[in-house]
Structure formats: structure tokens, C-alpha cells
Image (tube, rainbow, N blue to C red):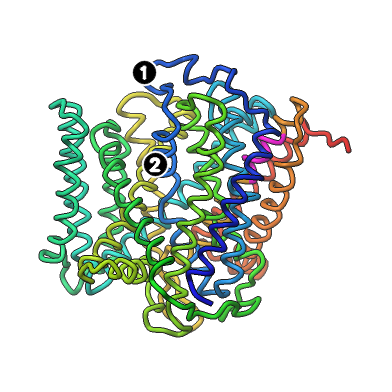
Amino acid sequence: MSLFTLALSSLILLGLGYLFYGRLLSKVFGLDNKKTTPACLVDDGLDYVPAKAPLLMGQHFSAITAAGPIVGPILAGLYFGWLPAILWIVFGAIFIGATHDFAALISSVRHQGHSIAKVVQEHTGKRAYVFFLLFIWLSLVYVITAFCDITSSTFAQPPYGGGVATSSMIYLLIGLIMGVSLYKLRMPLWLATVIFVPMVVFVIWYGQKIPILFPENWNPRIVWNYIILGYCFIASIIPVWLLLQSRGYLGGFFLYAALAAGVFGLFFGGHSIEYPAFLGFFNSEGIPLFPILFVTIACGACSGFHGLVSSGTTSKQIEKEKDCRPIGYGSMLLEGLVAIIALATVMLFPFGAEELNQPPGQIYANGLAHFVQQLGINREFALTFALLAFATFIYDTLDVATRLGRYILQELTGWKGNFGRIIATLLTLGLPAWGVTMTVTDVSGNIIPAWKVLWVTFGASNQLLAALTLLGVTLWLKKTGKKWLYSFFPMIFMMVITFAALVIIIKPAILGLFCGQFNFNLASTLSIALIILAILIISESLKNFKVKI
């Protein structure tokens, strides 16, 4: 089978999902443009600002699309083959992921633009609200740990990693200068775009000329982990206009350029599929397809992180209720396309190929560079562009995750001012700082990087967050007399796979405890904490949920 045939089939299915199932959900939720949205009602010029659908769609898509839909599909494809991975991406995105994002968005719009945690509080009570905030905070710790270590692995990977690190550092500096230019020097956005976007293109090429390299006795991955966490600390406490907005704006160009290159490669590259469609129900390490496939691919099929974005910033900018369909439902399907492109970078190579014995970021970069080369672009430039695009996606996630973690701790503790910002940020980054230094080995004694140890747990926590979000939506729908089964069944499915995955993760630690040999590690300990918090949230919710069939 050719990549063209598979890509076209997937694209048609995603389009049909948007046309028919998206339209059905719009009717179920009763979208009505006559209702005044919170953005129009409040319109404070700060957080509540009505935005046109095309503009808001781009912002929302950039916020939810990070490294998740790249790393997860690549790992799942390598583990089990491309067929089960692409089936979960396509049908998971249509019936579960996009439903989750759309439901989180419209439920927040109907609750004055409040976060999904506030929606849960309104329909379950204060205790569930506190448990839910703690759950979100622990989930964000996983995000920061896993994505930080993935980025450091990319920077430490020869021969291009050092040059990409250089380009990345200069890129952040450009974002900082652009932020100052926009807000202090009052430079028009169009002029800033004309000046700074070409500068980013230049540093992609120039970075390879001056790669950042460390002494041989240093562990570059560990050093980069701490540098990246230092960046997260700074990015979390400085004003958003100084770096995050401008960096995110520049990063959007990477996102769309990478998406365009991937689509071009899929449809016009003339590639055939080399990787096996199915490798078995257990991979070479004995990892079962069910439930691990469904938590390995989180973003790209379903992601609880999207619910935080939908009910955090996007819901406060919705101008008309019917905009929720393209923005909430449609953006998730576009992310599914990003996941398919990432999976295709595995499908280009046969099983056992040397190109696949690398970190996911490098596999993605090699595949995307191959697509970009079809346009006649130099391979070194194409590879650096792909690696920097990958790092840029992660920066966006790390920025948002660290800042959200700080917000949650400040909300729980009431800490204010500079003290609150600094202490809450340090506490949020404390566990990741310890987690990225973990030394874990496989049965052969080979060291496994932290991101690989934590990825399945990150996926499980992210998917469980989606399940709990759907639980809050279901409670709201049932109490208001709407058809709640459309969110109930996806919730049940996500609950089952995530609890099953978390049980698999903590099983060795529990067995060791009974033998008096409990090994304290970040993955098992936080997994136990997440299970306990989820059970507490569910028990509080059941008090307000009496099923009548």
C-alpha cells in the first residue's frame, strides 16, 4: 500500500467525522448563536476578548498541538505496527478526542468561561474541586518531566543535536527581543513578522555552524535537562508578553510549515509503506497492546490537556457558540492529521532499520526532512528545521504546563505576589528536576532515558484527566436534561483503559512491597497518587449522579 492511499483514506474519514458526527454533537449541545458568549458579555480587553473563528482556531490549534501527537504515534507504531496505531488515531479522534475537546469548550462557555475544574466544583462540590486541581497538578508534573527529557535527548543526539540546541537558544532570544519590540517599542505586528520570521529561518541554518558542545566528562542530556528546567522557571514567572506570546507566534510558523511539509510528503512523495502493519498483541518487551496502545498515543487521539486549554483561554474568546464546532471539534481532527504524519515517518522504513533505533524526535526529523527534500531543499537545513520544529512544539507545552502548575498551586494555597509565583514554580519543577536524573535500566542493564520510563504514565494520566473532564461534562448534561450518553460512553472507555494502564505500571511496585522490596520511583509513586485522587473524584461525583435508564 502507498502512503498516498492511506493518507487519503484517513483524511476522508476525518472529514466525514467533522461533517456528520461534529454536526450531531452541535445539535446535542444545542449550539445557538443567539446566546451571548462570556467573551462578548464581559469583554474586559484582558482575558475575555471575542475573536473571529479563523484567528481563534489558529491560536487554539497551536496551543494543543505539541510533541504529544509526534512522540506517541511513533512509539506505538514501533511497538505494535502502524495499523492499530492509525485506527486509534482516526476513530479515537473522531468519537472520543474531538468529542472531549468540543464538550470541554462548550461546557466552559456555558459556565461563564470558567475552567473545567470550576465546572466540576459546581456539579460535585468543593472537595472534588480540590482533588481535581491536585490531579491536574500531578499530571502537569508528568508533562514537564517527560517533555523536558525528550528535548534534552534531541539536543544531545549527534551529529545535529548541538547545532539544533544553538538554533533553539537563539530562537528563544529572538522571541524575547520580539516581545520587547512589540510591547515596549510599539512595533506593528506585520513589521515584527517581516523582521523576525526571516531571522528564525537564518538561525536554522546558522546553528549548525556553532553547535553547543560540552566537555566529554559531562552528561549532555542531564546538563540540558537542567538548562531547560531553568528556562521553564523563567518563562513561568515573567509576563506573558515578554516571551511566551512572541515565542508562540513564531512557533506557529514552524507548526504550519511542518504540517504543510508532511502533507506534501504524504500525497506527492510517491512513498510506499515499508514498516509492518501489525507486530502482535505484545511487543518485544512484553508490553500488551491493550491498554498500552491507547495511552501511548494520547495527543493525536485524545488528550486531557486539551480540556485545560479549551476551558482555560479558548472559551473566553469564543465570539459565537457555533464557532465551538470548528475550533473545539475541528482542531482535534487536525491534530489527528499531525499524528498520522508522525506515524508515517516510521512507515517510511522497514522493520529493524537503523533510522528507527533513535529517539522519537530524531525519527520524526529524519522522516520530515525526507519529505522536505522533495521540495529541493538541502538535507542538512531540512533536518535542522525538523528538529527545531520538534523542539519548538515542546517549548509551547513546557511553557503552558509550568505556568498552569504555578497557577494551580497559587489557587490552592492563596500565595500572592512575587513570593507566590517563585515558590509555586519551584515546587512545580521540583519533581521534574529529580525525575530527569533517574537512572533506570532494562533487563539487559542498558540505561533507559527518563522520558521513555515516564511516557506511558504520562499518557495514562493525560487520558485519565480526559475521562474526569468527560465525567464533569456528563454530570452537567444530565442535570440540564440533555443527552448525556454522548459523553458518558467515551468517559467509560477512557476510565477503563487508563485504570488498566496505571495498574500495569504500579504492579511491580506493589509486588515488591509485599516482598519487602518496594522501590521508590517517580512513575509508580505518582501513578498511585493519581489513582487515589481519581477514585476520590469519582466517589464525590457519584453522590450527584444517579443513573436512570
Using the image, determine if residue 101 lies above or below residue 374: above
Which of the pair 428/65 is nearer the observer? 65
Quadrant in which residue 158 is drawn: bottom left
- Mark 2 and mark 1 lie on one chain; the one further toward the N terminus is 1
Which of the pair 191/380 is nearer the observer? 191
Estimate the x, y position of residue 542 in percent, counting from the top left.
77, 36
| Residue drawn 28% across the image and 31% down it | 239
Estimate the x, y position of residue 296 in percent, counting from the top left.
54, 62
Quadrant in which residue 487 is drawn: top right
* Amino acid on which disc 1 is placed: Gly
Quadrant in which the C terminus is drawn: top right
| Residue drawn 65% across the image and 24% down it | 122
- Which mark, residue 45? 1
- Which mark, residue 400? 2
Using the image, determine if residue 457 lies above or below residue 405: below
Which of the pair 188/479 is nearer the observer? 188
| Residue drawn 48% across the image and 67% down it | 343
Helix, strand or loop for disc 1: loop
* Amino acid on which disc 2 is placed: Val
Quadrant in which the N terminus is drawn: bottom right
State left or right for residue 47 relative to residue 529.
left
- In the image, is residue 234 part of the stretch drawn in magenta? no
State left or right for residue 245 relative to residue 313.
left
Quadrant in which residue 234 is drawn: top left
Closer to us: mark 2 or mark 1?
1
